[in-house]
Amino acid sequence: MKIHLIALAIGALALGGAACSREAPSAEKAAPAPTTGAAEAPANAAHAPKDVRPGSHEDWCGEHAVPESQCSRCNPELIPAFKATGDWCAEHGLPESQCLKCNPDLKIARPPKGS
């Protein structure tokens, strides 16, 4: 009986850990919003080149559907700046201004071409 309870507890912990894993698929990745513009980027161009102008159409992280210059998941060195301005969701580990889990109505739109 004791071994059965231990196995059940381990199984519950394993499932709980998988649910919180950053590698787990999320609704954001499964169904990208049409306003993100991510579909416009070529499949092999998930990230913007290093020399793009911030705020331009080319400044886009196709992997995370946010401006590349503001993508704290690809550029962790940006995290202290977001935290310093109070724009940080500690629960989900990304800027509050980009947290679709806390702000499901949030729309992050890619700037139009030529901008």
Image (spheres, rainbow, N blue to C red):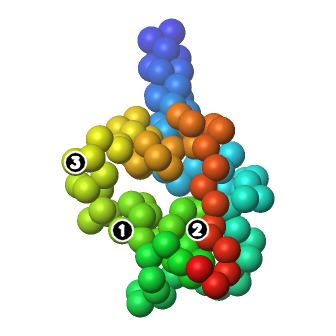
Number of the label disc, if any, that sits on residue 75: 1
| Whether residue 10 is visible | yes
Number of the label disc, if any, that sits on residue 84: 3
Dot 1 lies on which element?
loop
- Mark 1–mark 2 distance (CA, rounded to whole Å): 13 Å
Nearer to the camera, 22 or 103: 103
Q: Residues within 10 Å of mark 3 (few under 14, many from 20)?
A: few
Which residue bears the numbered disc 2?
63
> Quadrant location of the C terminus?
bottom right
Does residue 62 lie above or below 25 as drawn? below
Rendering coords of residue 65 (x, y %): 60, 63
- Mark 3–mark 1 distance (CA, rounded to whole Å): 16 Å
Nearer to the camera, 19 or 81: 81
Give the residue displayed 50% in from the left and 49% down from the top: 98
Give the residue displayed 52% in from the left and 25% down from the top: 12
Task: Name which residue type carries label 1.
Answer: Asn
Give the residue displayed 64% in from the left and 60% down from the top: 109
Rendering coords of residue 92 (x, y %): 44, 41
Rendering coords of residue 60 (x, y %): 55, 73
- Tag 2 near tag 3, CB within 8 Å: no
Viewer-side label of 2, 3: 3
Name the quadrant containing residue 75. bottom left
Does residue 95 lie above or below 6 as drawn? below
- Is residue 35 shown left or right of residue 24? right
